[in-house]
């Protein structure tokens, strides 16, 4: 079996360059924890709020700023849950289907993590401001034990992204603000997974993939302001990513030994989703503000991962368009103290029959509480806590190692994500200058 045939047959491992899951996020492998202020109200109304803390959602938020504005935040993400086997089978050539073996329950495969973010905006005059946000919208680490039942789909995965968004916001009139930004995104990923040898008595082989790349997208939005009501509409483009890296295969014996290899320059192209965002804020009283936000995620663009030379294949993903809905409140207890609360419902873009252990995603509820303390007229601090509850979901994507060859080895996956939840603790500071 040639290395090219082997890498094409097992190219599904390249899915892990982009097919990641994080236990505290908006959907699939997108992280929304870009603002401690927003976390307190479960990310409702961000596209309609003002200041640098909202640049990620809507660059129009900085139009008409009177002072310089900066924000910095950090979120501690504490996930928990189980990925369990419900009878996964492996079918080796010339043998009857047999249990995949290994540890049938993997607890907490997604590592705890810390997610930083920050933004700054500077007015050029009373209508125009320039801004810059730095975020990490797709970042996490998973670690399955070497003896996990899911080892042929996922072993160890690490993803880091840095999104740099320079923006401009303009107050066209007293009631209309517009904005636009460029998303410059760096992605770095590494992963590994086990490969079955032809006999269950033999130790598994292993493959490891590393890749990185720079890519570009854009963001644009408007805000409509009245004395009590603000409507924000924005759009974040899909981004076509191109990652280049190295693929290493080792530990295969017998007829498969010739497929041990080290390939460089492996290329994968894929899309992360667009976001169409509508947010609103209504000052019901001088103290109480009601917030709402709806986001349509264009996950249908993530239909396949297209692999370049020397693999030259497309790996179907079949994600679907999905939505999130959020509502929340801000209540000014005093001129210095504001309390917040909110709830968000997010629908997974993954589909039954297409979900694997590397992306054990599901529908979820996000409940948020938070508040702000104004230490002075220029400086305020934000705190928030979120509890995210995930629905149980099947893990049921059927795969095959060495597909299309005499050594084809189907993996009939039958598993479940269960008892999954996450606590997210956020803190931030906002400064006017």
Image: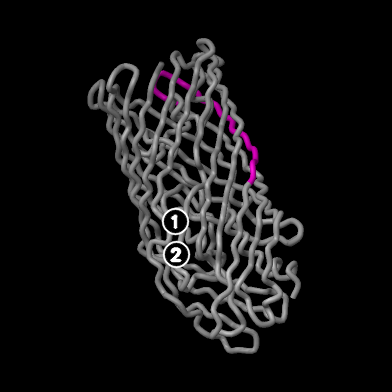
Closer-to-camera residue (266/57): 266
**Helix, strand or loop status at disc 1:** loop
Percent x, y for residue 424?
A: 35, 46
Residues under numbered marks 1 and 2 in contact, where contact means CB atoms less than 8 Å apart: yes
- 118 lies left or right of 265: left
- x and y percentages locating residue 86 in the rendered image: 44, 76
Other residues around mark 1 within 10 Å, as few (<14) / some (14–19) / many (≥20): some
Mark 1 vs 2, N-terminal side:
1
The reply to whether the magenta stretch includes residue 223 is yes
Q: Which residues are magenta?
A: 213-230
Residue 266 position within the rendered picture, expressed as x and y whole percent measured from the top left:
70, 56
Q: Is residue 189 magenta?
A: no
Q: Position of residue 413 (x, y in %)?
A: 53, 73
Mark 1 sits on what residue? Answer: 363
Looking at the image, residue 225 lies above or below residue 36: above
**What secondary structure predominates along the stretch shown in magenta?**
strand
Above or below, 226 relative to 250: above
Which residue appears at 76% of the width and 60% of the height? 310
Query: What colouring does the structure picture have?
Result: one colour
The N terminus - image quarter:
bottom right
**On residue 393, which mark appears?**
2
Foreground pick, 75 / 195: 195
Q: Give the residue at x 58% y 48%.
A: 188
Q: Image quarter for residue 84?
A: bottom left
How packed mark 2 is, by other alpha carbons closer than 10 Å (few <14, some 14-19, many 20 or more), is: many
How far apart are labels 1 and 2 at the CA level?
Answer: 8 Å
**In-image side of 201 versus 106 (left or right):** right
SS class, disc 2: strand
Residue 389 visible, this orientation: no
Residue at point 49%, 68% (across, down): 395
Can residue 55 be seen? yes
């Amino acid at each position: 079996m040639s290395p090219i045939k082997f890498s094409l047959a097992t190219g599904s491992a390249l899915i892990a360059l982009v097919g990641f899951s994080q236990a505290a996020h908006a959907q699939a492998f997108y992280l929304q924890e870009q603002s401690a202020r927003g976390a307190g109200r479960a990310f409702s109304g961000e596209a309609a709020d003002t200041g640098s803390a909202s640049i990620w959602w809507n660059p129009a938020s900085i139009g008409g700023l009177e002072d310089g504005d900066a924000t910095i935040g950090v979120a501690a993400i504490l996930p928990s849950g189980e990925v369990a086997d419900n009878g996964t089978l492996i079918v080796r050539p010339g043998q009857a289907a047999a249990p995949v073996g290994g540890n049938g329950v993997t607890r907490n495969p997604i590592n705890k993590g810390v997610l930083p973010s920050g933004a700054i905006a500077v007015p050029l005059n009373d209508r125009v401001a320039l801004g810059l946000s730095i975020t990490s919208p797709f970042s996490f680490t998973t670690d399955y034990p070497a003896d996990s039942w899911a080892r042929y789909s996922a072993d160890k995965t690490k993803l880091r992204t840095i999104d740099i968004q320079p923006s401009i916001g303009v107050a066209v009139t007293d009631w209309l603000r517009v904005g636009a930004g460029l998303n410059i995104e760096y992605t770095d990923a590494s992963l590994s997974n086990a490969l079955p040898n032809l006999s269950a008595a033999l130790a598994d082989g292993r493959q490891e993939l590393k890749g990185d790349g720079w890519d570009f997208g854009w963001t644009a939005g408007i805000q409509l302001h009245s004395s009590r009501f603000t409507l924000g509409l924005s759009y974040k483009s899909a981004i076509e990513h191109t990652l280049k890296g190295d693929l290493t295969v080792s530990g295969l014996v017998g007829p498969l030994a010739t497929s041990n290899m080290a390939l460089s320059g492996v290329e994968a192209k894929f899309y992360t989703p667009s976001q169409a965002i509508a947010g609103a804020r209504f000052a019901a009283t001088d103290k109480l503000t009601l917030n709402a936000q709806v986001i349509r995620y264009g996950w249908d663009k993530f239909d396949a991962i297209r692999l370049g030379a020397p693999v030259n294949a497309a790996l179907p993903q079949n994600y679907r368009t999905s939505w999130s809905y959020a509502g929340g409140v801000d209540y000014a207890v005093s001129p210095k103290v504001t309390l917040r609360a909110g709830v968000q419902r997010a629908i997974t873009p993954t589909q039954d029959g297409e979900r694997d252990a590397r992306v054990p995603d599901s529908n979820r509820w996000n409940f948020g509480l938070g508040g702000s303390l104004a230490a002075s007229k220029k400086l305020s601090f934000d705190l928030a806590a979120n509890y995210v509850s995930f629905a149980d979901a099947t893990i049921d994507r059927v795969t095959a190692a060495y597909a299309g060859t005499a050594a084809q080895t189907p993996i009939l996956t039958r598993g479940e994500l269960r008892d999954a939840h996450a606590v997210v603790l956020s803190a931030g500071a906002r400064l006017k200058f």
